[in-house]
C-alpha cells in the first residue's frame, strides 16, 4: 500500500512547505545543500591519547562516526527521508561506510552498513566498526550481502541489468522493496560516511544518490592546519574538515545548523559518548 515501507513510517503532519518540496524537487539531486566545517582536533586528540594511555585504541573516524550516530539519535529530523514524493521517519539508525581493502589502484572496494539503536556508547560503536571492517578486509573475495547482490546483478547482460534495476526502483518508490534488499543496499541508510582523509586528500562534497533513501553524506578529510576566527582572533589550529551534503527536504536550515553545533560540542568533548543514551527522541509528526 502506498505510504507504507519496511524501513520507515510516513509522516502525516509536516509543515506545508515540506509537504510541497518533494513535488517541486522530485529528485534528491534537486535538493542538495552543501556545507563544510573545520573540526578542531584538540578534543578528539586529547581523548584518543587519554584512552591510549588506558590501553584502549580509538581512531579519529570512529570518534566522528559515534558522534554522528549520537546526533541522529537526538535530532530525529536528520533521520527522515523522501521517497516516492512522500516524507518518512526512518525506523532505525544506519550508517553506510565504503572501505578499500588495500592502498593500491587494484584493491577492491566494499561497503559496510552499521545498524544502531541510538543508545550505544562509543565503545560499542567502535567495537562494531572494527569487527565489520576487519571481517570485510580479511578476504580478497567479496563476501558480504551487498557485494554478493551486486555481483549477482552484474552477472547478467546489460539489458537485463537495466530491467532489474528499473523493477527495483519501481518497487522502492511504492514501498514494495523487500526488507532483505533494503538491508543489503548501501543506498538505504540514514547517512553515508567516507573517510577520504585515509587517501591523503581533503574533504569533498559527495552527491546524494537519487536511488535509495540516503539524506546525508559526510566526507572526512585529512588532518591539517587551518586558521580559525574565534573570539575576535585568528588562530592556527589542527583540524579535520568534514564536507557535508544534505537533502533540504527533510528539515530546515536552522535545524541543520543546530545539529552541526551539537556535533561540534560532542567532538570537543567525546567523553560524553561513553554514557549510553537512555532518552531517545522520536520523530512523532
Image: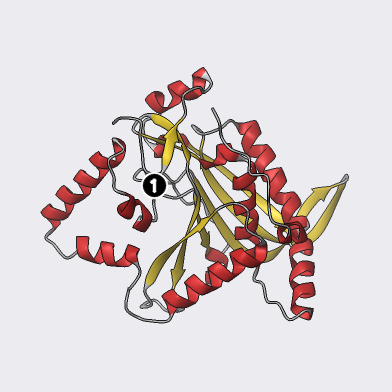
Residue 193 vertical placement versus 283 (above, below): below
Q: Residue furthest top?
A: 16
Farthest residue in the right direction? 232
Q: Position of residue 229 (x, y in %)?
A: 80, 48
Q: Quadrant of the N terminus?
A: top left
Q: Which quadrant does the C terminus fall into?
A: top right
Q: Position of residue 29 (x, y in %)?
A: 40, 39
Relative height, residue 38 to residue 232 (above, below)? below
Residue 283: percent from left, percent from top? 56, 35
- Colouring used for the render: secondary structure
Q: Is 100 placed left or right of 161 in the picture?
A: right
Q: Quadrant of residue 268?
A: bottom right
Badge 1: residue crowd in 10 Å (few <14, some 14–19, many ≥20)? some
Q: Which residue is mark 1?
A: 209
Q: Answer yes or no: is residue 270 visible.
A: yes
User: As drawn, is 123 to the left or to the right of 45?
Assistant: left
**Left or right: 280 in relation to 268:** left
Residue at screen point 73% across, 58% down: 275
* Residue lying furthest front: 278
Q: Secondary structure at mark 1?
A: loop
Judged left or right of residue 234, residue 182 is: left
Q: Is residue 42 above or below residue 165?
A: below
Say which of 222 and 17 sits in front: 17
Can the viewer see residue 226 in this picture?
no
Q: Is residue 284 above or below residue 180?
A: above
Residue 219 pos. (x, y %): 54, 56
Amino acid at each position: 500500500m502506498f505510504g507504507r515501507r519496511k524501513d520507515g513510517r510516513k509522516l502525516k503532519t509536516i509543515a506545508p512547505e515540506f509537504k510541497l518540496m518533494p513535488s517541486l524537487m522530485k529528485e534528491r539531486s534537486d535538493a542538495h545543500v552543501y556545507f563544510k566545517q573545520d573540526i578542531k582536533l584538540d578534543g578528539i586528540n586529547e581523548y584518543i591519547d587519554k584512552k591510549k594511555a588506558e590501553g584502549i585504541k580509538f581512531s579519529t573516524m570512529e570518534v566522528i562516526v559515534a558522534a554522528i550516530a549520537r546526533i541522529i539519535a537526538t535530532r530525529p529530523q536528520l533521520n527522515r527521508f523522501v521517497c516516492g514524493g512522500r516524507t518518512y521517519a526512518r525506523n532505525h539508525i544506519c550508517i553506510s561506510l565504503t572501505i578499500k581493502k588495500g592502498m593500491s589502484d587494484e584493491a577492491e572496494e566494499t561497503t559496510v552498513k552499521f545498524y544502531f539503536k541510538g543508545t550505544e556508547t562509543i565503545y560499542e560503536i567502535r567495537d562494531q566498526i572494527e569487527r565489520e571492517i576487519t571481517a570485510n578486509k580479511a578476504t580478497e573475495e567479496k563476501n558480504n550481502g551487498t557485494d554478493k547482490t551486486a555481483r549477482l546483478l552484474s552477472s547478467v547482460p546489460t539489458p537485463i541489468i537495466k530491467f532489474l534495476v528499473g523493477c527495483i526502483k519501481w518497487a522502492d518508490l511504492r514501498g514494495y522493496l523487500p526488507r532483505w534488499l533494503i538491508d543489503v543496499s548501501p543506498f538505504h541508510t540514514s547517512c553515508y560516511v567516507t573517510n577520504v582523509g585515509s587517501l591523503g586528500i581533503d574533504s569533498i562534497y559527495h552527491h546524494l544518490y537519487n536511488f535509495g533513501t540516503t539524506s546525508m553524506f559526510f566526507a572526512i578529510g585529512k588532518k591539517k592546519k587551518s586558521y580559525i576566527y574565534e573570539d575576535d582572533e585568528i588562530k592556527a589550529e589542527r583540524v579535520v574538515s568534514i564536507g557535508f551534503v544534505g537533502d533540504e527536504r527533510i528539515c530546515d536550515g536552522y535545524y541543520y545548523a543546530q545539529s552541526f553545533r551539537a556535533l561540534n560540542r560532542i567532538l570537543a568533548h567525546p567523553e560524553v559518548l561513553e554514557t549510553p543514551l537512555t532518552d531517545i527522541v522520536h520523530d512523532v509528526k
